[in-house]
Image: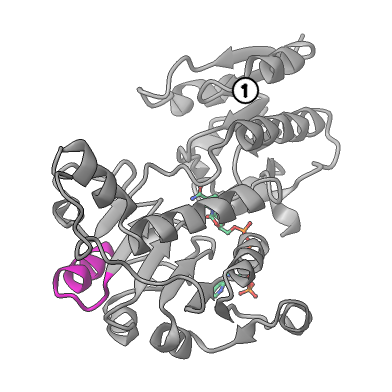
Amino acid sequence: MKPKVFITRPIPDAVVETIKETCEVDMWHTSAILPPIAEKIGALDGLITYGHELVTEEMMDTAPNLKVIAVVGVGYDHVDADAAKARGIAVGNTPGVLNGTTADMTFALLFAVARNIIPANQHVQSKQWTYYDPNILWGYDIHHATLGIVGMGRIGYEVAKRALGFDMRVLYYKRNRREDWEAELGVEYTPLDRLLEESDFVTLHVPLTPETHHLIGERELERMKSTAILVNIARGPVVDSKALYEALKAGKIAGAALDVTHPEPISTDDPLLTLDNVLIAPHVGSATIQTRTRMATMAAENLLAGLKGEPLPYSAFAD
Ligand code: NAP
């Protein structure tokens, strides 16, 4: 009997075909309706999650045969990893492959807000560009500005490398200082408060943990420059969105770009959607053809190894 596997959203056909060689595959057909994981998990040997769907301890308790949960993505805060570990269920993720892609998107968001790209496009598309006006859509310089990287790990490192190409001064904050990166890139370690006070742009790259929940709240936003722009490409709950709304509305910071929100999707009546100094993307930080395909391939490699009882090539527990 082939092991039973559920994939929570469509992944590339070629990857599905590889899994089908040794497994009985059930793939949820759409991203528009949440996959019924709780209903299916009891019969599964392996699960691929591709959309941050919660996988809880209670679900695992109904799955005596479950050997592996393979996350398509690097953040695995939606899976109760401690409960999995306690039950001998392997958990894999896809670190590394999306570093450059997510760092590119960090800069895309930063540029879009700093240089008013969306309003500029709207100005033209709404046929308001009837004469050249040198006094509209002024933004903020990126070159020679100060960038503060909060949570400088794999993705933050790539962001720092890109920042150097724009002649930026780079500050970073994390729990463990990286003097080797300071020597290599010329980045400067600072406590979080100083980073917030001195940065023109603050980008967030921490994982979501109890410690980083609302890491950026009212107190932190108060410390930022009134001309500063915040980019959250980590996880929505890392920022207190109510405090962010108040800060943006009161002009305590100049703007924000969010690739992630809480909840996801953002509620249609979320007050953030009423502001014109915030840009929100639907969690597309790693969404390129090359990277999403590679992520699905890595998740399949994790799945197949876990089903055979072998160590996962990309284990979340190794972090
Ligand atoms: P990583 O290599 O593990 O880096 C995370 C960094 O955060 C590390 O430098 C870590 O350093 C720091 N950190 C952890 N807890 C912290 C805390 N309490 N205070 C300060 N710093 C802390 O992870 P990554 O691969 O760069 O990914 C980072 C996160 O980005 C993921 O967990 C995921 O949630 C998010 N992400 C989002 C997208 C997207 O599409 N929007 C795509 C990929 C990843 P220390 O341990 O020294 O503190």
Q: Secondary structure at mark 1?
A: loop
State which quarter of the image contains the C terminus.
bottom right
State which quarter of the image contains the N terminus.
top right
Boundaries of the magenta span: 241-254
Task: Report x, y in % for residue 203.
Answer: 47, 67
Q: Is residue 318 magenta?
A: no
Give the residue at mark 1. 44
Quadrant position of residue 97: top right
Q: Is residue 262 visible?
A: no
The overriding secondary structure of the stretch rendered in magenta is: helix
**Tag 1: amino acid:** Leu
- Decide: is 272 above or below 167: above
Mark 1 near ligand 1 (CB under 8 Å)?
no
Report the front residue among 204 and 30.
204
Tally of marks = 1
Judging from the image, the colouring scheme is one colour
Q: Residue at x 55, y 16 (%)?
A: 27
Residue 179 placement, left or right of 192:
right
Q: Residue at x 56, y 52 (%)?
A: 104
- Which residue is farthest front? 131
Quadrant field for ligand 1: bottom right
